[in-house]
Amino acid sequence: MKQQFTIQAINDCAIRYSGYIEYSTDYGKTWCILDTLFLPEGHEAQFRNAKTKGNASFMIKGIFNVYGHISTLAPSGTKAFMWMFYQTNVVDVSNLILDFDELWPLAFEGMFSCCSNLATAPEMPATTLGAACYELMFSYCSSLSTAPKLPATTLAESCYSCMFKGCSSLVSAPELPATTMVNFCYSCMFRGCTSLTKAPELPATELAQRCYEDMFNECYSLTSAHSILPATTLYNGCYESMFRNCTGLTTAPELPATALADSCYAYMFYCCSSLKIAPKLPATTLAKYCYAGMF
């Protein structure tokens, strides 16, 4: 039997929800419709049947942890997980089980955005993603130092867009094994991750529109990038501003493509003030603004 979605109070918590939801404080023996719940320090409550016509979120005063299967709160396809804990003081969600193998558009968009005390992330087992499903999910979680594994190889438009934007304590990036890109899939993914020191390998050889745009912009601690970005089939804006403002970057990756696309390298290394050696640029077929502001 699946463990019910549960909120555990670290200190006294007052809990509300902007949609319809039911709660239990006796481990599922009785259920009530939530208006406002006072949950004393050390106590916990279970929740189910979250419903909303639009975005809904918990409004919680106090510090808390979350655990249990997310599917016991609401079924797949719901909007109940979007911006779910926005600007709350959740700390530990490592035992929250995101038990959906295939995600739908906007599934977890902004789910933990601006949770400045969040120190852990849940496992993310989904292998097939939906459009913008993880967009902004951990944005501005300034205490998050380790990213979860991201095993998906079937991506969707904007699926990881801005996922870790502004995570200023994040020191390492997860592996990104997908080889088939889609529009905006990694755009702004690590923008403003000022503690990130190394970029992950990006094995794709065929790119999509703005797939890497702003991916590492403002990653001031990034000192080394990939040895090579192997793509030879580019698309409009695919690398635009990718390493912009990476003031610690000393070496640039190889760029083997010979046929370019509009704005493909525009501002790619703009303001990289520590860059000592520029990569070779073997392209013989150029396009509009392909090298605009590159260095």
Image: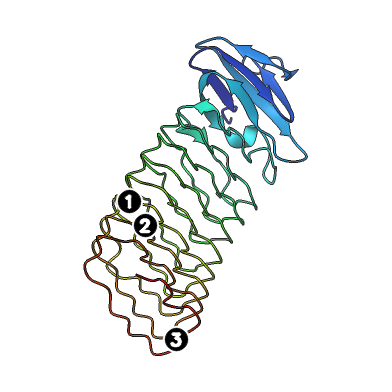
Closest to the observer, 71 or 251: 251
Going by the picture, which residue comes out furthest to the left? 276
Closest to the observer, 93 or 142: 142
User: Image quarter for residue 12?
Assistant: top right
Q: CA distance from mark 3 to mark 2?
A: 25 Å
Q: Which residue is mark 1?
A: 220
Which amino acid is tagged 1?
Answer: Tyr
Q: Earlier in the sequence, mark 3 or mark 2?
A: 2
Q: Is residue 250 left or right of residue 55?
A: left
Q: Secondary structure at mark 1?
A: loop
**Mark identifier at residue 262:** none
**Whole-percent x and y of residue 66?**
52, 27
Q: Is residue 155 left or right of residue 25?
A: left
Determine whether label 3 and label 2 are within 8 Å by CB.
Answer: no
**Residue at x 49%, y 47% (from the top left corner):** 125
In the rendered image, the vertical position of residue 167 relative to residue 242, given as above or below: above
In the rendered image, the vertical position of residue 205 relative to residue 122, given as above or below: below
Q: Which residue is mark 3?
A: 286
In the rendered image, the vertical position of residue 57 relative to residue 244, given as above or below: above
